[in-house]
Amino acid sequence: MDATLFPTAQPIAVVPQFPSSYTRGAQRIALPYLNRTVFISVDDILYLQGEGNYTFLYTRDRKRYLVSKTLKEFEKLLDATLFLRIHKSYIVNLGYVQQRICPKSRQVHLANGREIDISRRRVKDISRQLSQYWQQLYN
């Protein structure tokens, strides 16, 4: 068969958009993972998903880490100008948000194709904070 008929699937490039004032690679966090400690750059975290007393961290290299910390602990630890709690179960990295919020869908679209729901009560506040972030990004 001809190779041009069935092209190989290329992974989608997950590229963040950070303001020029932000220094990349400045902060790393240590995660206890499988009897060892893994250091992850904060810039590489796409989003965090809370499950009770545990949190899943999703990174741009498509890895998922399970950590025995709550989202509230991560919310205190991470930079509030870069990370935003959009739901009781989710914190997103604003550098990976791709589209503006549609009021009807109440979702954030990330660079990896994931769509995450936004809390009904906080839609206006979250859209305001996203607008401020994008103003920083393009000014």
Image: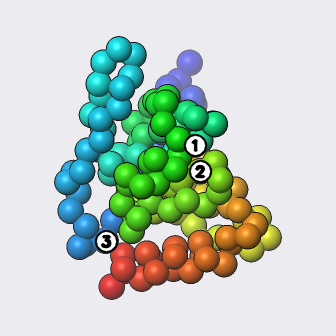
List the single residue furthest toward the top: 35
In this rendering, would 122 be left or right of 97? right
Quadrant (top left, top right, bottom left, bottom right) of the C terminus: bottom left
- Disc number at residue 121? none
In this rendering, would 112 be left or right of 59? right
Check disc 1: other Cα within 10 Å, few if <14, some if 14-19, many if 20+.
many
Q: Disc 1, disc 2: CB below 8 Å? A: yes
Q: Position of residue 94 (x, y in %)?
A: 46, 62
Which of 20 and 26 lies nearest the eye of the viewer?
A: 26
- Disc number at residue 49? 1
Q: Which residue is mark 3?
A: 19
Check disc 2: other Cα within 10 Å, few if <14, some if 14-19, many if 20+.
many
Identify the element where label 1 is drawn: strand
- Name the residue at 43% across, 75% down: 133
Identify the element where label 2 is drawn: strand
Q: Position of residue 16 (x, y in %)?
A: 38, 57
- Name the residue at 25% across, 67% down: 22
Q: Disc 2, disc 3: CB below 8 Å? A: no
Check disc 3: other Cα within 10 Å, few if <14, some if 14-19, many if 20+.
some
Amino acid type, callout 2: Tyr
Amino acid type, callout 3: Pro
Q: Colour mode? A: rainbow
- Name the residue at 39% across, 68% down: 81
Q: CA distance from mark 2 to mark 3?
A: 22 Å
Q: Which residue is mark 2?
A: 90
List the single residue furthest toward the right: 104
